[in-house]
Image (tube, helix red, strand yellow):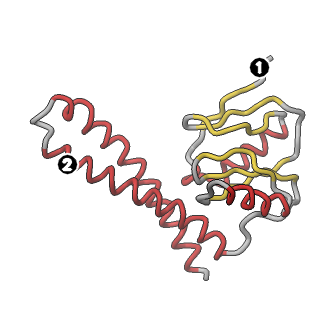
Amino acid sequence: MAKRKYMPSAGLAFAEEREMKKLSKMAQKGWVLEKFSFMGYTLKKSNPRHLIYSLDYQNVKGDGAEEYYDVFRAAGWEPVTSNGSVHVFSAQEGTPPIHTEDESKAEKYAVMKNWFGTIACFLTLLTIASLFFVQESVIIQRFIFPASLALTVPAAMTFITLQIRYAAVRKNL
């Protein structure tokens, strides 16, 4: 029997709550989140567990990381996996949510919104610049322009989605 399996992701910016619920259902079937994988997650075989999962977006490094995780541990949440500034935590069912106040939610979305905004701007500029030189170089024509365009669209869509979520939460403040 397989000890690990892959679960595709619909994208955390687009389906955060649905993704976390899906991971909880998998834990009840004996498959717990191990780590992020390319466009999804790696799950490992475990005893069935009644876990809930939650996300936080925070840039933490070095000594600040342990303090950051300790705050969540004190509230009953265990760090599961991180990728850059995206952190997934798990807890037993019934544990109070990580983000309960709109101000906390707004801060969470602001971090990722700003990061994706920067990436989307850079990729947009790269796409526009390569468009001007697409006839000048085969490398630009065949690789750089298509790659930058292919990356710009999802980055921009993610930024827009996060901006909408951020604005909706800020509206309630």
Q: How far apart are marks 1 and 2 (CA)?
A: 47 Å
Image x and y of residue 84, in percent: 57, 49
Nearer-the-camera pick, 116 or 63:
63
Residue at 61% across, 65% down: 108
Residue at 83% across, 65% down: 96
Label 1: element kind: loop
Residue at 78% across, 63% down: 71
- Residue 23: quarter of image: top right
Image x and y of residue 7, in percent: 65, 34
- Residue that numbered label 2 is attached to: 129
The residue most toward the top is 1
Q: Which amino acid does label 2 sit on?
A: Ala
Label 2: element kind: helix
- Residue that numbered label 1 is attached to: 2
Give the quarter of the figure containing the N terminus: top right
Image x and y of residue 163, in percent: 48, 66
Q: Which amino acid does label 1 sit on?
A: Ala
Nearer the viewer's eye, disc 1 or disc 2?
2
- Residue 9: quarter of image: top right
Q: Tell me which numbered mark, 1 or 2, is placed earlier along the sequence.
A: 1
Q: In this view, does 4 lie to the left or right of 141?
A: right
Give the quarter of the figure containing the C terminus: bottom right
The residue most toward the front is 63
Using the image, determine if residue 70 lies above or below residue 79.
below
Residue at 37% across, 48% down: 153
Q: Mark number for residue 41?
A: none
